[in-house]
Image: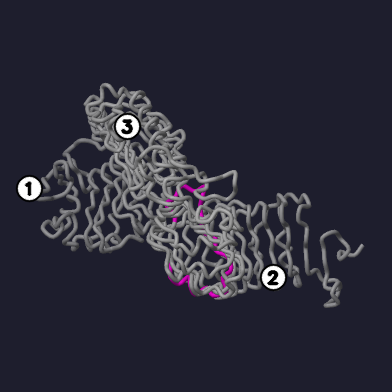
Amino acid sequence: VSICDWHGIHCASEDNSGGDTVTKIELSFNGLEGTLPSLVFHLPSLKVLNLHNNQVDVSLNDLNRATNLEEMILDSTNLKSLRSIGGGKSLKVLRLKDNFFGGTALPDEFFDLTNLERLDISNSELGGKLSERIGQLTNLKQFYSHKNDLSGTLPSQLGMLKDLEVLQLSENYIFGNLPEEMNKMTSMKSIFIDSFTKNSAGISGPLIAFDQMPFLKDLYLGSNSLTGTIPFDFLKGIADSDMPVNIGLDSNRLTGTLPADLSRFDQLNINIAGNMISEIAEALCSMNLWMEGAVGKYGCAAILCPVETYNDDGRQSSAEEPCIQCKGDEPTPFLGNKICTIEQKSLEKDILVKLYKSTGGENWKEKTGWLDDKVDICKWHGISCGSSGAVQSVLLGSNNLVGTPPKELFELPNLEFLWLYSNPIEFSFDGIEKAMKLTSLLLDSTGLKSVTGIGRAESLVEFDARFNSLTGPLPDEIKNLRNLESFSVANNGLTGTIPSFSNSIKIHSIRLGGNRFEGPVPGFENLKSLTSIDLGGNRLAGSIPSTLLQSANPEAQVTIDLSSNMLKGTVPKELGRFEDLTLLLRDNQLEEIDVSLCLNGRWNDGDVDTFKCDGILCGKGTYAPSTGRATKGVGCTPCDLSMFIGSSTCGVSGSSKRSSFAVAMALIFSICIIF
């Protein structure tokens, strides 16, 4: 039997373009297992390789040999690495969805595939920022990256994709403003950058007009943080006003009026509920074909429920789902409500009452207004509300809360700040994924024993759990905290190695000092915003990496605390790129300072200008009490027992100092709990 007659094999002879040379391998859903032989890519005429939905391991190392390969479909295989993907220079169609790439970013070589027309990498655990090199894929017509872990801002280079018709980036961790350059994608038909399951603030800033896209018919930006009004020229460039147009802007923070200019569309389906829209232009309520004909039946209510009414969708779509009148006298100021203020207040009050009763509210230090039916919950001590009247902050730090806060706290729909520090409570992260707007969680000095579950708090920007009883390694799930800007678990009993925080690309402060971490000092090379790290008082070993904070702004004020570890070698000269650095390195096993660093006069609050190298670390055979370096009022004193640079004592071992430090921290923690 000729190989051209084998199942799934196609040869050039089938289209009279050649002999029995293989041009296509199509074996989708065929039960393949094991490893794909790399020799497959050596087939000289291979144009199509389709192994969709087979549990087969695939390596792309020899992909560069497949010089005629135009279509490669490896959805739902065991492909785990994109190394050597740049070898597929002839590829026009590339489908890699439903694989597992472990949070890695698309490699730079990916953007050498300049012949690509259709790309699907959805649901494949791809992370990192969408590279500015995306602009090189100028032949791209369809780009699908739904349900990945892409983060960061959208690159302005998207505007270079003049032929792109579909952009699917829903369910990622993209944030920041929409780049104006997106308007240059003049072939665009469908844009999806909505997010309903990711706990992320999402896209923010103003809604751009999308007024240069004549073929646009689908635009979905729901569940983001867009602000401002809808532009008067919104969608003005659409050429065919008779075709159906679908717009999803629900659950943002848009304000003002739904503009009358939208009446140019005969069949517009626009979901804009859950915003802060105050008015609908009167002409729009007569557009009978809008909302799939619902406007012809229910008028304005089919677009947005009127003020002081609501339903689950914020609009009426059928006779069975009318807009329901809100109860009570408190007005609901906006159109399109999915819940009324009074119903919302009732639910939130029940949650706060449960908090009061479960944490010994009768013994709180301050409880003004609590449980008083005549006092609005927004005026209860420690509670503040946003413009919609919903609870935004629960600030009850150092208030003698005792017991277990209820998990229903996380069901406060607009909760952004939860501060329970310095209270002896039993805190659990169970249910925290429901707090989709929670940005600040302060739990220092509470007796917290575990941070298991914190990875589900994906909207967190600030987390503080210092002076607690945390032990063991930090869980891998912290990699899910992509919005983090400040992370502090200092002064606990944590062990293991220090994570890279590579997914938390907005982080500017990491405080892990006073624990028992071991291993090397991470370089944190990709964290451009990181300017403050405290890793002091651990058991870190090895040398200080020359790449430490290499992406940080050299003109920023930077703080690096690596004191009281077991670091060896030389203080690297590469740190000299920072103009204003506070560098704390006392009580390690360091041997030398690169002399070029001693010329950085602004370092250590000017101490380096005054004391030169001693302003960084005292030399061997000397010490400086507490600081290990010369500073105002403290000089480097001779000590024959100081074997390394940077000693803060004369004759006391580093391990003894760390033990004393641990005892002191335990004492401080006990005092915090008591008071």
Q: Main secondary structure of the magenta part?
A: loop
User: Please, is residue 314 above or below residue 468 in the view?
Assistant: below
Pointer 2 local density, CA inside 10 Å: few below 14, some 14–19, many at least 20:
some
Q: Bounds of the magenta span?
A: 179-202
Residue type for callout 2: Glu
* Pair 2/1: label in front: 2
Q: Quadrant of the C terminus?
A: top left
- Would residue 580 be found to the left or right of residue 371 on screen? left
Foreground pick, 25 / 633: 25
Residue type for callout 3: Asn
In the image, farthest residue toward the bottom: 17
Look at the numbered disc 1 and give the secondary structure of its residue: loop
**Residue at mark 3:** 468
Question: How far, Cα to Cα, is label 3 from label 2?
Answer: 57 Å
Foreground pick, 329 / 406: 329
Q: Earlier in the sequence, mark 2 or mark 1?
A: 2
**Residue at mark 1:** 633
* Pair 1/3: label in front: 3
Q: Earlier in the sequence, mark 1 or mark 3?
A: 3
At x 57% / y 50%, what residue is drawn? Answer: 317
Q: Are marks 2 and 1 in contact (CB under 8 Å)?
A: no
Q: Position of residue 555 (x, y in %)?
A: 25, 64
**Residue at mark 2:** 70
Residue 182 among magenta residues: yes
